[in-house]
């Protein structure tokens, strides 16, 4: 007997069940914590439609984000979302399925271009009228995969590259995003809105972007999974930039599998992403890594000098417990790793200043004038902020923008030397640790519990952060919920060498299966 292909069988199931469950019998349920695999199964069985799911999230955004606890995670919703959902439901009824994301609403960070009625702003009032002429490369991939672009999420303005005294999660356009576990606490940045939205069940998954910690930190603070890809696996074209040597978009979800499903749709070679490293000949198979996930015999290195300004005993207890779980599952633990980072941070900041000016000017010059008010370069952004300071700088300034504007071209020796220094310290540090101990991954706490939001003094993260090594090197990292400190989430990071994305995702999934510590926020 000839076997049906997976998608042929799936299509047959959809057609049969759709006939047995007419649309008027679909019951509205609470999908705030439902994973994407379950959502797809319910849609395949005719118990759920993309329209009902989209409306559920829109209602929840209205009830929790714009009212109630007022999380302030979403800057705007897509006015076309329900129409797109209807079109995808119709395609499903005809057996025209596009894959695991078919009919799944996805939120995007507000620095990602969409060619629709939504603006792309990076949270800045100066770009409030900027509507992209084309979808970002990753947005096109998501649409082709059947995802519904539900809306844009708030962020730290200019992806947290505006002021040294800023408050993460604040933008002049979107205001302050609040931590879903305690609204007095900070969500971390810059992908704060994406993380908070996923944690609060405003969508199953969201896309964030990272230059250094902007996916990892907010994911940890909101108790979700965040994946920071290897540099170049995910296109940066159509994303308001900071630095081409570190920038990447990445998926965020409540489970590793959900984040991996989104990641699989995002990966793709973009020959027009001219500043990206060479695309690999073989794309990491992140979904196969989930099926093969195991910790047995895996050699895991424990990074002990992860904290820049001291450790937190409560975080250390969670870290110790996580290590014990890994060991119980057969992992070989190599403890007490230390990776030297002296000089890396200062060199990185110099690189970011140079590249921000270069990349932002290129982005702003490439967009079509809207109403004559959209800034055309970094200097114009600075001038706009000065002219509208009551709105754009109510609590902190734009000192980083001014520092970046003072930089010269990327041919200057100071930039070239800083880039070589920062990259070599980060890459050699990770590579040497992996090779010396034949490691499959390195682990460290992603960060500590969320700090109190302070618009006077700015962020006070406490010095605990392990994101910089992976960020500066351009290597992959995954953060998974590992525990709670006084009701606030703490994540565990897995990171490794270039293009180890699939292996890290598999290890994170294997840890999640035995050590999942995610607790949904009480909203």
Image (cartoon, grey):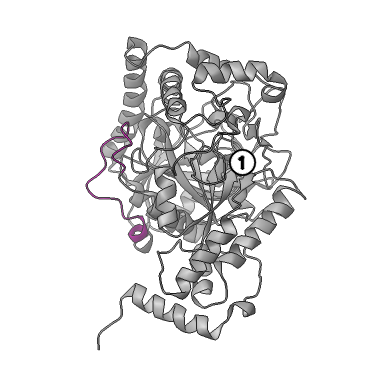
Q: Which residues are magenta?
A: 270-289
Q: Is residue 398 left or right of residue 288?
A: right
**Does residue 153 show up?**
yes
Q: Residue at x 62, y 54 (%)?
A: 202
Q: Is residue 245 left or right of residue 108?
A: left
* Residue drawn where x is 56% and y is 82% of the image: 21
Q: Residue at x 64, y 53 (%)?
A: 200
Q: Point out the residue furthest to the front here.
A: 371
374 vs 517, nearest the viewer: 374
Farthest residue in the left direction?
281
Image height check: is 516 above or below 163? below
Instruction: Pick out the residue farthest to the bottom.
Output: 1
**135 sits left or right of 474 in the view:** right
Provide residue 377's location: percent of width, then percent of height: 49, 20
Q: Is residue 287 magenta?
A: yes
Is the residue marked by circle 1 packed among few (<14), some (14-19), or many (20+) residues within 10 Å? Answer: some
Q: In front: 196, or 256?
A: 196
Inspect this view and state whether residue 220 appears.
no
Q: Position of residue 147 (x, y in %)?
A: 48, 57
Residue 33 drawn at (x, y percent): 60, 61
Q: Quadrant of residue 248?
A: top left
Look at the magenta stretch and give its main secondary structure: loop
Q: Picture quarter containing residue 337?
A: top left
Q: Is residue 394 above or below residue 25?
A: above
- Residue 271: x and y in percent read 28, 40
Q: Which residue is mark 1?
A: 314
Tag 1 secondary structure: helix
Q: Nearer the viewer, residue 281 or 484?
A: 281
Q: Quadrant of the N terminus?
A: bottom left
Q: Residue furthest right?
A: 68
Task: Look at the image and say whether residue 284 sits in the magenta stretch.
Answer: yes
């Amino acid at each position: 007997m000839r076997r049906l292909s997976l998608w042929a069988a799936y299509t047959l199931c959809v057609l049969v069940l759709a006939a047995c469950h007419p649309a008027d019998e679909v019951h509205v349920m609470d999908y705030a914590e439902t994973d994407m695999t379950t959502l797809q199964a319910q849609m395949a069985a005719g118990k759920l439609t993309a329209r009902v799911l989209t409306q559920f999230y829109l209602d929840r955004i209205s009830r929790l984000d714009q009212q109630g606890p007022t999380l302030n995670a979403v800057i705007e919703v897509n006015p076309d979302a329900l129409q797109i959902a209807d079109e995808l439901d119709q395609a499903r009824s005809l057996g025209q399925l596009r894959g695991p994301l078919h009919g799944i609403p996805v939120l995007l960070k507000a620095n990602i271009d969409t060619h629709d009625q939504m603006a792309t702003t990076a949270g800045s009032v100066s770009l409030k009228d900027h509507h992209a002429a084309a979808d970002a490369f990753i947005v096109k991939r998501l649409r082709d995969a059947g995802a519904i672009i539900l809306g844009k999420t708030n962020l730290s303005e200019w992806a947290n590259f505006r002021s040294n005294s800023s408050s993460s999660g604040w933008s002049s356009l979107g205001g302050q995003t609040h931590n879903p576990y305690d609204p007095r606490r900070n969500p971390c940045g810059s992908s704060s809105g994406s993380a908070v939205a996923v944690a609060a069940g405003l969508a199953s998954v969201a896309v964030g972007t990272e230059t250094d910690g902007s996916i990892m930190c907010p994911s940890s603070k909101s108790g979700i999974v965040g994946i920071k890809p290897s540099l170049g696996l995910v296109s940066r074209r159509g994303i308001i930039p900071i630095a081409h040597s570190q920038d990447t978009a990445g998926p965020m979800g409540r489970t590793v599998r959900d984040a991996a499903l989104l990641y699989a749709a995002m990966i793709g070679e973009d020959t027009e992403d001219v500043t990206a490293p060479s695309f690999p000949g073989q794309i990491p198979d992140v979904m196969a890594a989930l099926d093969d996930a195991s910790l047995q015999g895996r050699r895991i290195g424990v990074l002990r000098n992860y904290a820049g300004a001291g450790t937190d005993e409560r975080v250390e207890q969670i870290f110790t417990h996580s290590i014990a779980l890994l060991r119980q599952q057969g992992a070989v633990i190599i403890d007490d790793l230390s990776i030297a980072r002296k000089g890396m941070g200062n060199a990185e900041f110099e690189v970011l200043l140079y590249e921000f000016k270069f990349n932002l000017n290129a982005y702003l010059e490439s967009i079509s004038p809207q109403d004559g008010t959209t800034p055309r370069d970094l200097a114009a952004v600075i001038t706009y902020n000065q002219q509208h300071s009551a709105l754009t700088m109510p609590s902190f300034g734009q000192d980083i923008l001014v520092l970046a504007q003072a930089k010269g071209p990327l041919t200057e020796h100071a930039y070239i030397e800083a880039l070589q220094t920062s990259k070599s310290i980060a890459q050699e540090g990770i590579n040497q640790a992996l090779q010396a101990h034949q490691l499959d991954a390195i682990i460290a706490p992603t960060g500590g519990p969320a700090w109190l939001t302070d618009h006077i003094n700015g962020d006070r993260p406490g010095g605990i952060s392990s994101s910089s090594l992976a960020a500066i090197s351009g290597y992959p990292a995954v953060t998974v919920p590992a525990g709670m400190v006084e009701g606030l989430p703490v994540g565990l990071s897995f990171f490794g060498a270039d293009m180890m994305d699939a292996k890290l995702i598999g290890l994170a999934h294997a840890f999640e299966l035995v050590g999942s510590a995610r607790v949904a926020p009480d909203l």
